[in-house]
Image (cartoon, rainbow, N blue to C red):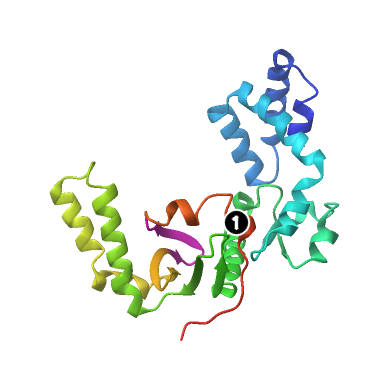
Amino acid sequence: MFSRRAVAHKLDSFELMFRQMMGELRPSRYAGDQIIAHNMALNIDVRAYHTYSFETVAESDSGRLIEEFLALSIPRLFLYGDANNTLSYLPRLRSSAVQVREIPLSGHFLFYDNPVETFQVVAEFVRTTHCRSVTMKSNVRITILLASEKDARAISTLIRKNANAVLSADYSLQQLAAWKRYNAPARIRQRMAERTAFCAFRAGRLCGTIALQGSELVGSILARTCAAKASGRYCWPILKPSPRRRA
C-alpha cells in the first residue's frame, strides 16, 4: 500500500509523504503498525525506501509472484491477518495445495499483532511436514526428520566441528572449550527433552539441524560442506518432496 503511494512521488517530495505515512501508522489499533512507524523513524533511510518501492510495485504488478509461489515444489504456508480477509488472491491460494491460515486480531504485520497465534501456526506447519525427503538437481537426497535422542552424538559432533572452523578465530581457547562442553552429547540430549528438534541427512550423514522451543526457533546449524549446496533462495524452487520415514 505505502510502496504504491511512494512511487507517485519524486524523492524530494516523498520525504513529506514518508512522515505522513508514519503519522498514519502511529494511531492504528494494531501493534504492528505502531512498531513499524517507530522503526521507520529510527531505522529506515528515506532514499532507500523510495528506491525499493519502485521494485516492489513492479514485481507486484508483473503477476509473477503468486505463480512462482504456487509453482514451488515444497510444502507451503500462507498467513494473513483477519483485517486483510478480502485479499483478491485468497480464493486462488485456497484452491491450491497451499495451506492458508487466517490469524485473528491482526493486520498486515501479524507477527507483531498476534505473535503467539502466528508462531503456533508456523510450529504446527513444521511439525506436520517434518518428514520429507527432497531431491535437488545435483541428485543429492536430503531427508528431514524429527530428531531423537540417538541423534544427539551426531548433532554434538556437527556443532563442535563447525565451532572449530568458525569460532576459533574469535574465541579464546577457554571460550571454545566451554562452548564444546555446552554442546557435548549429554547436554544435547538434555536440551532435546525440552525442545522439538529436526535433523537433515545427506547420504545418511547429518548435515544440518534446527530446534524449536514452543513456537520459537532457538537454534540452527548447517554443515559447512553442505552450505553452498543446500541453502539459499535458488535451491527452494527445485526441491521435490516425497514422503519417507526413517526406520
Q: Residues within 10 Å of mark 1 (few under 14, many from 20)?
A: some
> Which image quadrant for residue 169?
top left
The x, y position of residue 57, in whole percent, is: 76, 35
Q: Nearer the viewer, residue 236 or 112?
A: 236
Q: Nearer the viewer, residue 146 or 20?
A: 146
Vertical order, 187 against 21 (above or below): below
Please report the bounds of the magenta region as a residue range.
210-223
Vertical order, 44 against 72 (above or below): above
> Which image quadrant for residue 62?
top right
The x, y position of residue 76, in whole percent, is: 67, 63
- Label 1 sits on residue: 236
The single residue placed furthest to the bottom in the displayed view is 247
> Which image quadrant for residue 171?
top left
**Amino acid at dot 1:** Trp
Q: Quadrant of the N terminus?
A: top right
Residue 211 sits inside the magenta stretch? yes
Left or right of residue 242, residue 60 in this image: right
Residue at image coords 56%, 68%? 134
The x, y position of residue 229, in whole percent, is: 48, 55
Residue 127 sits inside the magenta stretch? no
Left or right of residue 179, residue 124 in this image: right
Vertical order, 246 against 118 (above or below): below
The single residue placed furthest to the front in the displayed view is 138
The x, y position of residue 34, in whole percent, is: 63, 39
| Magenta stretch, main secondary structure class | strand
Residue at image coords 58%, 66%? 120
Residue at image coords 51%, 64%? 215
